[in-house]
């Protein structure tokens, strides 16, 4: 899938997160890494944004009001125009225990290493896949 | 890139502040935000820097951000005198930065971005913000200040950082920042007559227990030191298995009265008025120490030179025992000591050398050191419990002008509660002559000769003489010859 860009020409990331503070901190962090960021408070708001833009990556929390991360994932994978967008699923619960986590390209336990998170984001944006764990 | 410790493998972050981890039940919880609150001079900056440098020694990095007009040079000039800073070879692991201008120009949002940017670029795991009150003052609304704290907590969680917010604010305890952070530690001080003392108090540690209440602290060349209240952290020490073994008092004629000696790992109080011979009996006990079963003499009033002379006068070679390492003397003048510091030093000395015999000369020294004398009984119970758990047989002396207790002396009930064995030493004035007398009042799980004995002290040491006969009232302090009525002169 072609890399989508924000208005500034930087890769665009859509962040769906209901907690204001995490949304804000993630936005600052991602912007400092050179991305444009659009934010949504839940899955429905994220889908609204996806009607008009095609981001390079969707980062979504799992537990959100109105529409949670699993529903958002299913909606993205079920839409031909959106289905190829890489999705990173984040959660405070162990993501691999969550239903439909396999629909995400990568999962990440909240509170993990920041460097790992940013490396995953960079790889998903650049290659549509998480960093390889195969030995060089 | 530093060799970071993977905190996810550990429940706690050790602080490097002696005693603090103990009251935090192991240390700080990582990825959390803490308020360290205290007035000027209470030690916030020292404590926070000590934490940073300790973590730096473990290979981590820290960011120390000030929001004050004070220059870093001024801050570091004083800190460089501290041992914890000198001990750290790599001083490049703690980064200092001022966000004073950022706060003035860009407000709280600017400071948040400043912290995130610098924490990330320096790859730190600890962030200290010195001057939280400056943020409070700069916040346009209470809500924006709350959001700042909230944002910082989110960053701590996402980045895996631990954040310390230092403040001298005296805002009420119901202020939102105290409810929003993960932990709240207060540094404070108090006055007792002319005496000033410092203390620390943990008010909150989210998701963890902690040892509540006040714990005395001290700041010196080594840095910040917390002395947990002994009875709050050591009350559950488990005693060693009971042994039938007896530990000689050092006075064979006394051993005969108590089935061969003091019960192993028991505590014995030598109670009596000044000058009666309590220290002499204690010296006889401690001079039974050997290199294999070492002894410790812990006192408040007499230094080793005086004690050596006193022992020599009793025919005891304390000097040789000191030289061989069989006995160690720790002397603490009864000035402004911290009672828990005394206990810490005593227990450290006991464990360092595997002490089996302990003589505490003047247990009242603990009461005099206590800022809160009412806790002395509980403190002594905990101390004895620790010693018993370490297999130490303890003898201590206690002044007791009157059996029922005097205002200035430790109450008999307090001594009785901690002493498993009690020997009462009294003067008896009979026929215009002062007699030194000894009676066993209590002996753990064993019988004893239930009589009053006369004793003497001389070049042959402490010696039990014959049983007092034809007398009554010696123990109650009203001795008289039987059939003659009370000797009211005595």
Image (cartoon, helix red, strand yellow):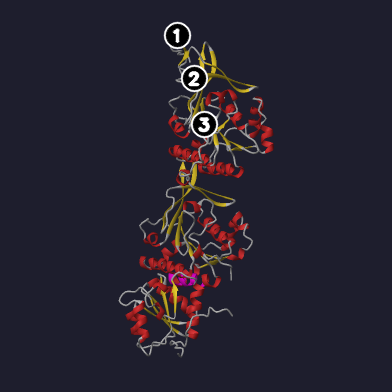
User: Percent x, y for residue B473?
Assistant: 45, 17
Which one is closest to the eye, mark 2 or mark 3? Answer: 2
- Could you say which is closer to the camera, residue B227 or residue A109? A109
Q: Residue beneath label 2, please? A: B451
* Residue B66 at least partly seen: no
Judge left or right: residue A68 versus residue A106: left
**Mark 3 belongs to which subunit?**
B
Which residue is at the far top? B484
Whether the magenta-drawn stretch holds residue B113 is answered as yes
Marks 1 and 3, the one that precedes in the sequence: 3
Q: How far apart are marks 2 and 3 (CA)?
A: 18 Å
Q: Give the range drawn in magenta.
A: B108-117
| SS category of the residue bearing label 3 | strand
Q: Distance between the residues labelled 1 and 2?
A: 20 Å
**Mark 2 belongs to which subunit?**
B
Q: Residue beneath label 1, please? A: B484
Marks 2 and 3, the one that precedes in the sequence: 3
User: Percent x, y for residue B247?
Assistant: 57, 32
């Amino acid at each position: 899938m072609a890399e989508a860009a924000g208005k500034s020409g930087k890769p665009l990331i859509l962040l769906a997160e209901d907690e204001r503070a995490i949304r804000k901190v993630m936005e600052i962090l991602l912007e400092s890494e050179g991305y444009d960021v659009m934010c949504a408070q839940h899955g429905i708001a994220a889908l609204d944004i996806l009607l008009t833009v095609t981001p390079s990556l969707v980062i979504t929390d799992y537990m959100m009001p109105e529409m949670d991360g699993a529903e958002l994932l299913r909606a993205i994978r079920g839409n031909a125009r959106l289905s190829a967008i890489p999705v990173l699923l984040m959660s405070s619960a162990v993501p691999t225990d969550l239903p439909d986590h396999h629909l995400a390209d990568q999962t990440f336990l909240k509170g993990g290493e920041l460097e790992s998170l940013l490396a995953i984001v960079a790889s998903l944006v650049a290659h549509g896949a998480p960093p390889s764990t195969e030995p060089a | 890139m530093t060799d970071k410790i993977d905190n996810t493998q550990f429940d706690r972050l050790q602080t490097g502040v002696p005693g603090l981890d103990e009251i935090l039940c192991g240390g700080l919880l990582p990825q959390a935000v803490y308020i360290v609150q205290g007035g000027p001079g209470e030690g916030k900056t020292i404590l926070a820097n000590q934490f940073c440098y300790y973590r730096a020694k473990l290979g981590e990095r820290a960011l120390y951000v000030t929001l004050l007009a004070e220059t870093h040079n001024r801050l570091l000039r004083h800190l460089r005198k501290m041992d914890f800073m000198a001990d750290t070879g790599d001083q490049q692991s703690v980064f200092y930065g001022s966000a004073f201008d950022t706060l003035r120009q860009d407000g709280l949002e600017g400071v948040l971005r400043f912290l995130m940017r610098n924490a990330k670029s320096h790859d730190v795991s600890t962030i200290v913000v010195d001057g939280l009150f400056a943020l409070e003052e700069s916040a346009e609304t209470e809500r924006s200040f709350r959001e700042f704290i909230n944002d910082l907590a989110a960053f701590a969680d996402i980045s895996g950082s631990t954040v310390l917010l230092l403040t001298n604010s005296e805002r009420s305890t119901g202020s939102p920042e105290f409810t929003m952070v993960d932990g709240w530690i207060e540094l404070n001080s108090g006055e007792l007559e002319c005496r000033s003392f410092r203390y620390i108090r943990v008010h909150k540690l989210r998701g963890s227990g902690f040892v509540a209440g006040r714990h005395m602290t001290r700041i010196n060349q080594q840095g910040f030191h917390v002395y947990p209240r002994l009875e709050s952290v050591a009350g559950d020490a488990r005693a060693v298995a009971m042994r039938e073994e007896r530990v000689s008092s050092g006075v064979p004629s006394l051993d005969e009265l108590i089935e061969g000696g003091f019960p192993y790992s028991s505590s014995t109080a030598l109670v009596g008025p000044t000058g009666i011979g309590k220290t002499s009996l204690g010296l006889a006990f401690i001079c039974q120490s050997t290199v294999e079963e070492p002894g410790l003499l812990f006192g408040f009033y007499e230094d080793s030179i005086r004690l050596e002379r006193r022992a020599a006068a009793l025919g005891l070679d304390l000097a040789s025992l000191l030289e061989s390492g069989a006995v160690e003397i720790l002397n603490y003048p009864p000035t402004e000591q911290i009672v828990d510091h005394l206990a810490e030093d005593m227990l450290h000395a006991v464990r360092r050398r595997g002490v089996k015999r302990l003589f505490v000369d003047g247990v009242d020294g603990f009461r005099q050191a206590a800022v809160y004398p009412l806790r002395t009984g509980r403190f002594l119970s905990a101390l004895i419990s620790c010693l018993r758990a370490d297999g130490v047989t303890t003898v201590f002396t206690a002044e007791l002008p009157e059996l029922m207790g005097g205002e200035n002396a430790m109450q008999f009930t307090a001594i009785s509660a901690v002493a498993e064995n009690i020997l009462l030493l009294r003067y008896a004035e009979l026929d215009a002559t002062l007699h030194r007398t000894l009676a066993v009042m209590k002996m753990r799980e064993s019988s004893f000769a239930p009589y009053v004995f006369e004793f003497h002290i001389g070049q042959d040491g402490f010696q039990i003489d014959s049983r007092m006969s034809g007398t009554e009232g010696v123990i109650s302090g009203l001795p008289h010859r039987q059939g003659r009525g009370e000797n009211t002169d005595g």
